[in-house]
Image: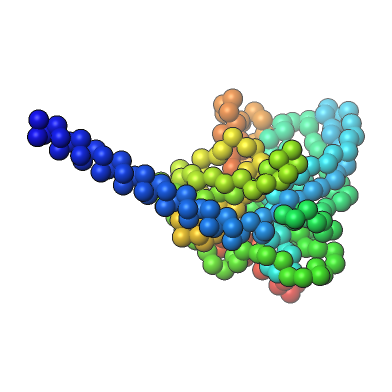
Amino acid sequence: MRTIITAAALGWALSSYAWAQDAATSEAGRQLAKKVADAIVTVRVATKMTMTFEGESSNQERKSESQGLVVDAEGSTIVPLSNLDPSALFAAIGGEGMSMKTDITDVKLVRSDGTEIDAKIVLRDKDLDLALLVPTKQPAAPLAFVNLAEAGSAEALDPVFVFSRLGRVANRALYHRVTFIGSVIERPRKRYVVEMGQLSSEVGSPVFDRTGKLLGLITLRAATGGAADAGDATGRNSVLPMVVPSVDLLKFVSSAAAPAK
């Protein structure tokens, strides 16, 4: 009987400890969300696309929304390039005889209070799947931002916080999620893989480590070789969401201000 009671007490103690840890993690996430929410903006894009397949072309206009992360007080914003211009991603996985041409006609940053800021693309990197946006006019007041120089770190199975913006149907409310690092890829460049949620809009989401520092931004990594090399029905061997670390984000943004050589 004493053994049963001891085991029950131990089980209760462990479950209570786990609950306390979960509660602490949730509270830390809520406090972090309050701090960074205004730096997570909706990016609204209008594009004209031309699709070509075996010599036949079709044109269409498209409006889409994704999310971006403001990285300085002037409103410079990083966003996955594939969210703005999917042509590079399409070229990698579309297969032979297929092509896409995209003309971006309008870009706006929609802040958490609903105000809109006209923006333009000043830098692209297809390999990183990143684009840098800047307002076309100086904002009337400094914008909330996340400092890329304060880089986070994580190892496999570490908990992380992922924040994204819901769509218009949910009034673009902030979506909070706690997940774990599923894989740390060291070569050819360091990347993190987190378990993706049910929202496809999480591409472009910032990821923060347990201390509240920015770990990186979720972008898409496409393997070259076209659809024939997709490997399986899930597409895991052709396209995979990965977290580009803060150090690479900082280098990318800094290159926009670097003088031409």
**Rendering coords of residue 112 (x, y %):** 72, 54
What residue sits 57% from the left and 55% below the top? Answer: 33
Residue found at the very far top of the displayed protein: 233
In the rendered image, which quarter contains the N terminus? top left
Task: Indicate how the structure is coloured in the image.
Answer: rainbow
Looking at the image, can residue 17 be seen? yes
Total numbered labels: 0
Looking at the image, can residue 190 be seen? no
Side of 149 relative to 181 (left or right): right
Depicted 228 relative to depicted 141: above or below: above
What residue sits 88% from the left and 28% below the top? Answer: 56
In the rendered image, which quarter contains the C terminus? bottom right
Name the foreground residue: 76 vs 96: 76
Q: Quadrant of residue 246?
A: bottom right
Depicted 165 relative to depicted 197: above or below: below
Depicted 77 relative to depicted 166: above or below: below
**Rendering coords of residue 71 (x, y %):** 66, 64
**Rendering coords of residue 31 (x, y %):** 53, 57
What residue sits 54% from the left and 58% below the top? Answer: 32
**Rendering coords of residue 235 (x, y %):** 60, 31
Depicted 163 relative to depicted 11: above or below: below
What residue sits 50% from the left and 46% below the top? Answer: 178
Side of 196 relative to 121 (left or right): left
Name the foreground residue: 204 vs 128: 204
